[in-house]
Amino acid sequence: MKLFTTFAVLIVAVALSSGTSSLSFEVSAQDTKKAQDTYTLAPEAKLGPVAFSHVNHTTKNRNLEGTGPSACIECHHTAQPAAEAAKHPPLKTGWPADRTTTLTAELLVADANAVGAVCRDCHARTDAKPKLLPETPQIKFETGTELVTLTNQQAYHRNCAGCHDEIAKTRKDVNPPTSKKCMACHKRAAA
């Protein structure tokens, strides 16, 4: 079994380094979690769900500078030690609180549980209680004076659209969907 596990990790490492963009891989022999190429976000949204290309963000030049893939913690902000998260306001939470590692693709290959919490574990829908926290996080942004409850809708829009808006301002080589182009991401089902 140990030989099989070692072989499986080796195959994943080779596949990741080869730049295969349509890869859906098994994280470990014991855990059947797989990184999907595309995730459906906001399945209950009034404007329709969003097909998020995880593989494009993790293999192509999608960071703010356009020099490489987005870092895992750009979206999975809790997947780092709290002291690191605190350096990048407004995101200031690490999960679990005693976390000592920062999520990377390499760490995920070695530890299928490295992601830790996922969005809805903390950012619940409106009028719902989050799984991991006593209440949905609230935050005061630099540009405002009121607390904003970071429901899953608020968290997705502020993180995804915020990054896309910043890229649209700073990079002329791409034209990402911005916060003003809702239907570029949200797709209603055909009637």
Image (cartoon, rainbow, N blue to C red):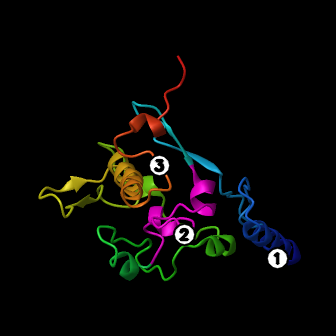
Circle 2 Cα neighbour tier, 10 Å, few/some/many (<14 / 14–19 / ≥20): few
How far is the residue under mark 2 from the one under mark 3?
16 Å
Q: Earlier in the sequence, mark 2 or mark 3?
A: 2
Q: Position of residue 96 (x, y in %)?
A: 44, 73
Q: Are marks 1 and 2 in contact (CB under 8 Å)?
A: no
Which residue is depicted at the point 34% across and 74% down? 88
Looking at the image, which residue sits at the far left?
Answer: 145
Residue 117 circle label: none
Residue annotated with mark 1: 6
Q: Secondary structure at mark 3?
A: loop
How far is the residue under mark 3 from the one under mark 1?
41 Å
Residue 67 circle label: 2
Q: Quadrant of residue 47?
A: top left
Residue sitting nearer the eye, 68 or 173: 173
Please tell me whether mark 3 or mark 1 is closer to you in this view.
3
Q: Earlier in the sequence, mark 3 or mark 1?
A: 1
Residue sitting nearer the eye, 28 or 53: 53
Q: Position of residue 139 (x, y in %)?
A: 23, 61
How far is the residue under mark 1 from the one under mark 2?
32 Å
Q: Are marks 3 and 1 in contact (CB under 8 Å)?
A: no
Q: Position of residue 91 (x, y in %)?
A: 34, 68
* Above/below status of 57 relative to 71: above
Look at the image and say whether residue 74 sits in the magenta stretch: yes
Residue bounds of the magenta highlight? 53-80
Look at the image and say whether residue 20 sits in the magenta stretch: no
Residue annotated with mark 3: 175
Q: Earlier in the sequence, mark 1 or mark 2?
A: 1
Circle 3 Cα neighbour tier, 10 Å, few/some/many (<14 / 14–19 / ≥20): few
